[in-house]
Image (spheres, rainbow, N blue to C red):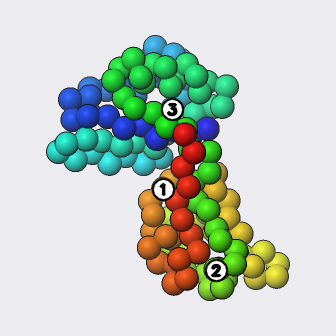
Amino acid sequence: MKLLVTFSRKEGKKPIIAQVVRDTGVLVNVERAIIDSSEGEALIDIPDESCRVVKDKLADLGASVRILEEEISLDENECVDCGACISICPQEVFSFDEEFRLRVDAKRCVLCGRCIEICPHRALSRRVEI
């Protein structure tokens, strides 16, 4: 399960993800992290069965957590199967099927947003479920 963890500058200076791993015993895969002068954001992947304990621990440490159910949404009515997203995606989220229609493996997505920006028909969007 993917979680989007947001934290303030103060919490960003603390090893909160390391603390979560230490205190819960749950291994955390950090797929993407962005930290600037005012806040930080990390996309992490954890086992589904550990969601509640990890989410609670992150909240105890001052982080805000959102569960990401579906990362990228494809509007099949807008998509022209051009493949621009295939060429730009660093995680191989997109591929063509045997009939050269675009397929999306959203579980691989790390929310970099490159595909959304490059899509000439705006057929891709970010969908976040809380």
| Residue 59 position within the rendered picture, expressed as x and y whole percent measured from the top left | 41, 23
Distance between mark 1 and mark 2 Cα atoms? 20 Å
Of the numbered discs 2 and 3, the one sitting upstream in the chain is 3
Looking at numbered disc 1 in the image, what kind of residue is underneath it? Leu
| Residue 44 position within the rendered picture, expressed as x and y whole percent measured from the top left | 49, 39
Residue at (65, 71) in percent of width and height: 75
Would you call the spot at circle 2 few (<14 residues within 10 Å), some (14-19), or many (20 or more)?
A: few
| Residue 33 position within the rendered picture, expressed as x and y whole percent measured from the top left | 37, 46
Residue 21 visible, this orientation = yes
Question: For residue 105, which quarter of the picture?
Answer: bottom right
Looking at numbered disc 2 in the image, what kind of residue is underneath it? Glu
Callout 1 secondary element? loop
Looking at numbered disc 3 in the image, what kind of residue is underneath it? Val
- Kindly indicate whether the residue at mark 3 contacts the one at mark 1 (C-beta within 8 angstroms): no
Whether residue 16 is situated above or below residue 84 in the rendered picture: above
Whether residue 118 is situated above or below residue 7 in the rendered picture: below
Of the numbered discs 1 and 2, the one sitting upstream in the chain is 2
Question: For residue 123, which quarter of the picture?
Answer: bottom right
Question: For residue 14, which quarter of the picture?
Answer: top left
| Front residue of 52 and 128 | 128
Whether residue 38 is situated above or below residue 85 in the rendered picture: above
Q: Which residue is mark 1?
A: 111
Q: Which residue is mark 3?
A: 28
